[in-house]
Structures are given as structure tokens and as C-alpha cells.
Image (spheres, rainbow, N blue to C red):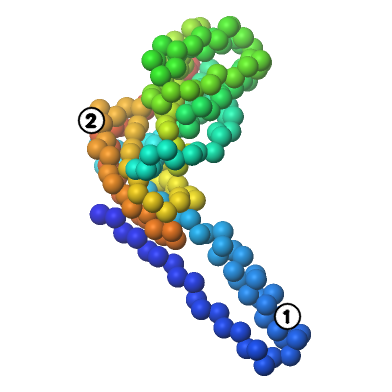
Amino acid sequence: MISIHVNTLAAISFDTKRSMPQCFTRSLCCALLVAPLALVQAAQLNAVVAGSDGKPLVDAVVYLLSQREGVTLPKPKDTNIDQVNVTFVPLVSVLQTGTAVHFPNSDNIRHQVYSFSPAKTFTLKLYSGKPSSPVVFDKPGTVTLGCNIHDQMVAWVLVVDTNLFAKTDANGKLSIKNIPEGEYWLQAWHPSIRKPFDKQPLAVDAIATVDKTLTLDALPIAPINHAAAH
Ligand SMILES: [Cu+2]
């Protein structure tokens, strides 16, 4: 079920008989009222995602693909996937197609990051510190990252043709903000998903808050015991 609550602006009336100072005060007051409202002219999706065990699912991704052809997306900003304590941080990333990813190494040992995934195949040189150039994720799809030195290191990247996406927190919650009015396909994904999520049509009004509850056929990724893995 999709529930949509539309916020309406309260009508604001002016009293033209007021003196100038009062009029000015009122105008200022109106400006202060309208300014924050103007910032919420786009819609927001709030989702709660559960796994197949019925519990909140962390690191689940929800994204919205426009049903309209030829939508122009903003240029994606560069991002980082760090290596801290022989672990990729973050464990799961969702990126707009074309995003350049830097792989800084915050450990005092060297790593060699690679991917054999068709959506992005690459191998960085063995390095410490920050590699000179980022890796551009130029095709949509899922990418699994590994390290040639530390077999236990793994991370996932979902590359999508949209800038409307978010990842669940520890409570299985996420929000996608600033959604332009339109018709979308809602999709969801998790690194451990077994049965792919069936995309859902979603119509979004100009000013709306959409609340969704989703269940994925997925379970949380077990934390790696680094002490045992070394
Ligand atoms: Cu490594």
C-alpha cells in the first residue's frame, strides 16, 4: 500500500489598511514563513525495509527510476570507499552511473582493490595512502569489491541510472529527499538478496511524503571476525 499525505500551504492574507511599519513586519513575517516551505516543494519517500527474517534490514538500497525517457541527471559527485582496519568502509555503496570513486587506504598496511564484476572490472596497484586517480563506475549494475592481499575484505557497490536513492540504517529505515513530481519505478536491492525485488510503480506528487514498508528476500551480512581471519 502507498499512502500519500499532501501538505497544503495555508492561505496568507494581507491587511492593506495597516500602516507601513506593520505592513513591513507582516511582509517579513510572511517571507520567513514561506522561505522554509519553499525548500520542501519536492516530495520525500520514507521507507522501512525488513529482511526475510522479518527484522529491520541494514544496508538495503531503495532507488527510484523515472518512467520518462531521457531524464537529465546532475553530474555525480566523487565519493570515497575507504579501507579501515582491513575492512571496506562503507560495506555497501549506491552510486549514480558515472560516479568517480576514490579508494583511500587508511591502514598502515597495503591493499590491492579489485573487481571481476562485469559492471566494472578493474585492479588497482598494491598501494598505501591514496591512489592518484579514482575509478569511474560507468555502467549500471552490481559490483563486488575484494582485496588481493586480504581475502576476507569484501564490499558491494550498486550503480544505478538515477540520483534518487538511499540506503537503510541499522533500524532498516531510509529517506529519499527532493523527489521531483513524476512517475517512477521503485526498486530495492541488498547484497544478500536471493529473489530479485519486483519493481513497483510509484506516482509522486509535487509536495508529498510517501511512506513505504518493504520486505526483501535477504538477510543481514554477517560481520567478519578479523581476529579469526588474520
Ligand atoms: Cu587488503
* Residue at 42 percent of width and 38 percent of height: 70
Asked which secondary structure carries label 2, the reply is loop
| Percent position of residue 132, x then y | 66, 15
The quarter holding residue 49 reads top left
* Residue at 71 percent of width and 80 percent of height: 25
**Which residue is the site of mark 1?**
24
* Residue at 74 percent of width and 90 percent of height: 19
Q: Is residue 1 above or below residue 172?
A: below
Estimate the spatial distance between the alpha carbons at disc 1 and disc 2, rounded to whole Å. 61 Å
| Percent position of residue 201, x then y | 28, 46
* Residue at 75 percent of width and 86 percent of height: 20
**Which residue is the site of mark 2?**
195
Judging depth in this view, the residue of 96 and 73 nearest the camera is: 73
Q: Residues within 10 Å of mark 2 (few under 14, many from 20)?
A: few
Asked which secondary structure carries label 1, the reply is helix
Which one is earlier in the sequence, the residue at label 1 or at label 2?
1
| Tally of numbered discs | 2
| Percent position of residue 57, x then y | 35, 38
- What amino acid is found at the position of numbered circle 2 in the picture? Lys
| Percent position of residue 106, x then y | 63, 20
- What amino acid is found at the position of numbered circle 1 in the picture? Phe
Residue lying farthest to the right in this orientation: 21
Q: Is residue 17 left or right of residue 98?
A: right
